[in-house]
Amino acid sequence: MPALASGAGHEPGLYELLAALPSQLQPHVSRPEDNTFLQHMFGERGLHLLVKIHERLQHYEESKPTPVLDSAGALAHELSEELEKKSENGDVKELLNLLAKPHMKSLLSVHDTIALKSYDPELPPLPEDIDDDEDSVKIIRLVKNKEPLGATIRQDEHTGAILVARIMRGGAADRSGLIHVGDELKEVNGIPVDDKKPEEIIHILAQSQGAITFKVVPGMKEEPPTKEPKVFLKALFDYDPVDDKAIPCKEAGLAFKKGFILQIMSQEDPTWWQAKLEGYANPRAGLIPSKQFQERRFAVRRPVAAFPVQRTASRRLSGFRKSFRLSRRDKKTNKSMYESKKSEMYDMADVPTYEEVAPYQRQNGAKHRLVVLVGPTGVGLNELKRKLLISDPQHFSVTIPHTSRAKKTHESEGVEYHFISKHLFETDILNNKFIEYGEYKGNYYGTSLDSVRSVLSKKKVCLLDVQPHTIKHLRVAEFKPFVVFVKPPTIERLRETRKNAKIISGKDDKGSAKPFTEEDFQEMVRTAQMMESQYGHLFEKVIVNDDLSVAFSELHLALKQVETETHWVSVSWTYS
């Protein structure tokens, strides 16, 4: 076969060779059908496209591309969470299914591994001019890429020696297995560090790229670490190491948001734990403040006296459930209109940092988790409950409240209320049988724990709206509450969306309604901000009721996921 002409100094690509091949082969083909076959085969559009893709990839590889990011897996995970809120759309569902496929997850994981260049380091040959005691000196080479080495150093107060303070789990130093806590650092890339401060050494390391050579004197031989059980914590506050003046190394810190799940890799340091974000591809651990340390800091920043507990007589009533038909104008006259089985002072003194959690999925036939709705008066809790009940009355249900008032002629026991004597009501109060209760015109009204148990025992989802400081007393393994906070939009949007709406404010049992006022809007937003600030760590889902139908769809989807998917819950709820 003759050689193909390449043009004036130009070497043809595979695509050009493929296009020219039929004409070059024609003189050597005797039968017409063979020529037709070659024309069809080499003229196939799909083959041409594959060759074009090959050349593009080859050209891309020759340009030595650098990855745009090294956390594609984490980005895909975040995207999936965002898209779940809009999964009614067909295109969104298709994308969610694609991102959930194991092959796609594996592809993104491999991409991140290559982007991070987290390969095992290669050890160089030992130098020939070692003048120290060869048995007490180690020469270590680690390959440094974009990620930190994963070790912190400190200076010994007495000797001035530079020592390895901690090894971050999953980092380059930890994966190498060559550097240990207590090792004394003598040189970095041939530069002695005896006369340098830790900050100067960190600067040298930051400027270094590729392979870094360390000369270290091993510390005391440590016992092999025992395998710690996996511990997962749910973060109840936001944390950014950049803003933390106390952290020993900001670069080694791990930032997280409230609600993130942290896997604790090490609690050896009582002040700074090592953790990594659950569900993220990066295997490297980072420093986070320990529970005890963060609790002390929060206690100093937010003393109990800073909370407005002195206003309980009027403020607590402002959010009291309208199903008890309490009037806004009665706030000042009813001194003990609302009580809880534990004082509000106890709730305020709680300092939220971390909660130990475990994965939980409801099994078929098991009782449903209690659904707790929280929000300020007028935000639409009753409307959302009503829509859920109408959507599936065989699946959703509400509790029947108790009252000490006399039954009216049109009422039936166990339908509108459970009617009990005032003496029995007060006895049940003393025995902590009520989740919440209030007194109106000399009569008690309340929601009992047994009324919740009654709904759950029928294998129905119990919908309950309560004051937020009662949530803590419901957070037990028996109920496993899923807490949804319904918050209002901005005051501007409230004016638009509640233009023709009314708020219940009647003094009698039938109730009456009046249009929303500007004061109502301001009170709603102010109360929501206070609730979120003080109790936000207890909320598992936040829904903005900007549009009732949209809020209902979001709530309905969240409750479906609670029943069918795995969620992180308090570890105490999973004990048998």
Image: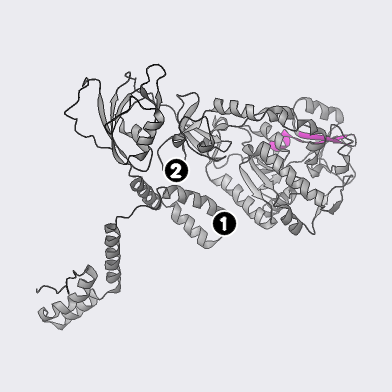
In depth, the one of 268 and 122 nearer the eye is 122
Residue occupying the point 32% across, 20% down = 219
Mark 2: which secondary structure?
loop
Q: Which residue is mark 2?
A: 280
Q: Is residue 131 left or right of residue 303?
A: left
- Tell me if label 2 and label 1 are in contact, CB under 8 Å: no
Q: Given this view, does label 2 or label 1 mark the residue nearer the observer?
A: 2
Q: Is residue 4 visible?
A: yes
Q: Tag 1 or tag 2, which sits nearer the N-term?
A: 1
Q: Quadrant of the N terminus?
A: bottom left
Q: Quadrant of the C terminus?
A: top right
- Magenta-colored span: 436-453
Residue occupying the point 70% across, 40% down = 531
Residue occupying the point 38% across, 20% down = 160
Residue occupying the point 73% across, 56% down = 492
In depth, the one of 431 and 140 nearer the eye is 140
Q: Is residue 188 left or right of residue 280?
A: left
In the picture, residue 59 is in which quadrant?
A: bottom left
Q: Main secondary structure of the magenta part?
A: strand
State the image coordinates of residue 543 (x, y, percent, origin top left).
65, 49
Instruction: Compute the Cα span from label 2 to label 1.
Output: 23 Å
State the image coordinates of residue 462 (x, y, percent, origin top left).
68, 42
Q: Is residue 208 above or below residue 270?
A: below
Mark 1 residue type: Lys
Q: Which residue is mark 1?
A: 86
Residue 2 located within the stretch drawn in magenta: no
